[in-house]
Image (cartoon, rainbow, N blue to C red):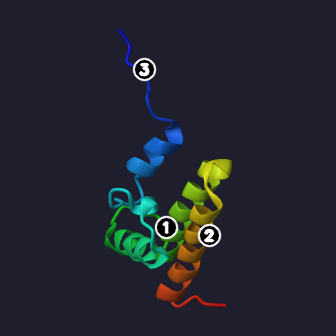
Amino acid sequence: MSEKKSKKWSQQVTDNSDAMDLDKDVFTQRSAKKIADSLKQSAEQSHRRKASPFQSAMSMLNFYINRAGDQLSKSRRTTLEKAKAELRKDFGREP
């Protein structure tokens, strides 16, 4: 008997990324700074990523935002967009 897949492929990527190990529920935190700090730490500690830590962290955040699409509330999207700005700041890539 085959098991039904209970998660979408995008959720599996988020949960089991080959690029880096993410903290549990990283994207559900209320603070943009905490999200950015967690992604930065995960990216810097990963030895499996192919890109720079900044690129890996930003890519994972963008992936999450893009896959969530219209399912994200306006306030959640705002927090995640602020997390992008925090990531840029943390990595010294402010415009």
Secondary structure of the residue carrying tag 2 is helix
Pointer 1 and pointer 2: residues touching (CB < 8 Å)?
A: no
- Mark 1 or mark 2: which comes first in sequence? 1
Pointer 3 and pointer 1: residues touching (CB < 8 Å)?
A: no
Secondary structure of the residue carrying tag 3 is loop
Three-letter code, disc 2: Thr
| 3 vs 2, front mark | 2
- Mark 3 or mark 1: which comes first in sequence? 3
Which numbered circle lies on residue 66? none
| 1 vs 2, front mark | 2
From the image, tell me which residue sits under label 1.
Answer: 56
User: Where residue 47 sits: x, y (%)?
Assistant: 33, 66
Name the residue at 60% across, 65% down: 75
* Mark 3 Cα shell of 10 Å, populated few (<14), some (14-19), many (≥20): few
From the image, tell me which residue sits under label 2.
Answer: 78
Disc 3 and disc 1: Cα gap in Å? 31 Å
**Residue 76 position by quadrant:** bottom right
Three-letter code, disc 3: Lys
User: Where residue 73 sits: x, y (%)?
Assistant: 62, 56
- In this picture, is 12 found above or below 93? above
User: Where residue 16 sits: x, y (%)?
Assistant: 38, 48
Q: In this view of the protein, can residue 91 be seen by the observer?
A: no
**Residue 46 position by quadrant:** bottom left
Which numbered circle lies on residue 4? 3
Disc 3 and disc 2: Cα gap in Å? 34 Å
* Mark 2 Cα shell of 10 Å, populated few (<14), some (14-19), many (≥20): few
Name the residue at 53% across, 74% down: 83
Pointer 3 and pointer 2: residues touching (CB < 8 Å)?
A: no
Name the residue at 41% across, 52% down: 17
Secondary structure of the residue carrying tag 1 is helix
* Mark 1 Cα shell of 10 Å, populated few (<14), some (14-19), many (≥20): many
Q: In this view of the protein, can residue 43 be seen by the observer?
A: yes
